[in-house]
Image: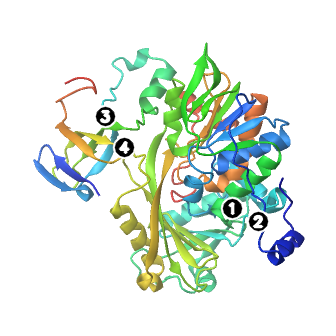
Amino acid sequence: MQKKYSWYSLLKAGLSGQDWDQAIPLIQPKSKYDVIIIGGGGHGLATAYYLAKECGINNVAVVEKGYIGGGNTGRNTTIIRSNYLRDEASSLYEHALKLWEGISEDLNFNVMFSQRGVYNLGHSLQNMRDIERRVNANVLNGVDAVVVDANEIKQQIPIINTSKNARYPIMGASYQSRGGVARHDGIAWGFARAASMLGVDIIQDCEVIDIEVEEGRVKGVKTTKGEIMADRIGCVSAGHSSVLAKMAGLRLPIESHPLQAFVSEAMKPVLHTVVMSNAVHGYISQSDKGDLVIGAGIDGYNSYAQRGSTKIVEHAAAAILELFPIFSRVRMNRQWGGIVDVCPDACPIISPTNVEGLYFNCGWGTGGFKATPGSGHVFAHTIAQDKQHPLAEPFHIDRFKTGALIDEHGAAGVAH
Amino acid sequence: MLLIHCPYCKESRDQSEFSPAGEAFIARPKSPEGISDEEWADYVFYRTNHKGNHWEQWVHSNGCRKYFLVERSTISHQILQVAPFGARNSETEL
């Protein structure tokens, strides 16, 4: 059905009128699977891929209510890094970053992963103390990180404003050279294509309307395309996790908020790296197409509307202009919002639940994109073995009962 | 952008004057020492996160600085009603 992509196939298709095979077949669901994954975003597709590739479970369906990668996977600012403070979090994100480094070859799909480095700026003495602490923690955990001062930043990024007269002068930064960006829908398509080549059914335009539970065991799901049975179900639906949990009679320690981003018109290369600042709260990179990709913060109220308030966008724009006055005349092209599932400790839940056979991978909040391959990998192992992958163990939902929270608020930078 | 009516100032003002303050009607357990870890976790961390009409708290932070209740749709953001604290204690009560 599908052929391997190579320079030869590219040349051949280029000369023969771009006659490509369909990457992912459009199919109807079967009545029964071994595992159903609810949510066809990056994390869900990655889960299905690793279930088929590493866990020997090929009879898997991914059900997606829209189209694959049309949710948060296609709505984020594509920043990838692993410089988190806490051991548990940095191990998980570093696992993901290592997978990113080989993912294009693994999936036979160019996800345009570009390790252009990530700067996290500090604007006060306390910021710098926090940055030094985090960099030291990163180095101890085997994550590459260095502290750089304002002069080095200016050398690397000539357009940044390091003047001492700035309202919030830049004093230094942490720098992770292995961090960077990737093509966000590329990773969804790549995982979807690779998973479907391994026999996974990817069913789009198929919304789950109920989860069937009998005597504490999950039985299957009711969808807009009929009933589908499975003994094991993984929910990877980001902003709608609480809605799915409610179908199974559960509650989650999660609230859904809008997170916004916007891009400018395309321009010539001007910013070769990723710059983030928690203190003024903005983050920016330039895409390969040439547009500036700028991320804002979340709105404080609950929402499922995929749009947020103007004042949040204004705030992010002000922060970016504080760092880069040169962008003051840049015109913005598009602006959008996604619904993020925020946990009280800003860390994900990768966990079995009180319903046997029902697993949740959620709560990634504002920073899930960078974890896509790692999240899918540990979640696949968690589902396949009915036992948490060692890296996922600290992210059990019971941590809210035991109090063993992994407090990453501010630690690794509120801005993701 | 929301236009919020403060039940104390009795004026509809721009959202930028207000701050959201979370889900409404979460009552502190009456006997904290007598409840289980699950019940504590539910009170402190677990939320309804309702998709649809949702009762929440807002504070008029750049105005009278008082907290009040708002029923708002989390799908359309439309505000259905506002009420001062004490006017009701649960979603079902009228």
- Residue at image position (55%, 44%) is A238
Q: Rate crowding at label 1 as few (under 14), some (14 to 19) or many (20 or more) other CA atoms within 10 Å.
A: many
- Residue at image position (36%, 68%) is A314
Which quarter shows the C terminus of chain A?
bottom right
What's the chain of the residue with tag 3?
Answer: B
Mark 3 vs mark 4, CA separation in Å: 14 Å
Mark 2 vs mark 4, CA separation in Å: 37 Å
Amino acid of disc 1: Gly
Q: Rate crowding at label 4 as few (under 14), some (14 to 19) or many (20 or more) other CA atoms within 10 Å.
A: many
Res A253 visible: no
**CB contact under 8 Å: marks 1 and 2:** yes
Earlier residue among tags 3 and 4 = 3
Amino acid of disc 2: Asn
Instruction: Classify residue A160 as left or right of residue A145.
Output: left
Residue behind mark 1: A186
Mark 4 vs mark 1, CA separation in Å: 30 Å
Q: Are marks 3 and 4 on the same chain?
A: yes
Q: Secondary structure at mark 4?
A: loop
- Residue at image position (43%, 31%) is B44
Q: Position of residue B92 (x, y in %)?
A: 27, 24
Which one is in front in this view, the residue at disc 3 or the one at disc 1? 1
Amino acid of disc 3: Ala
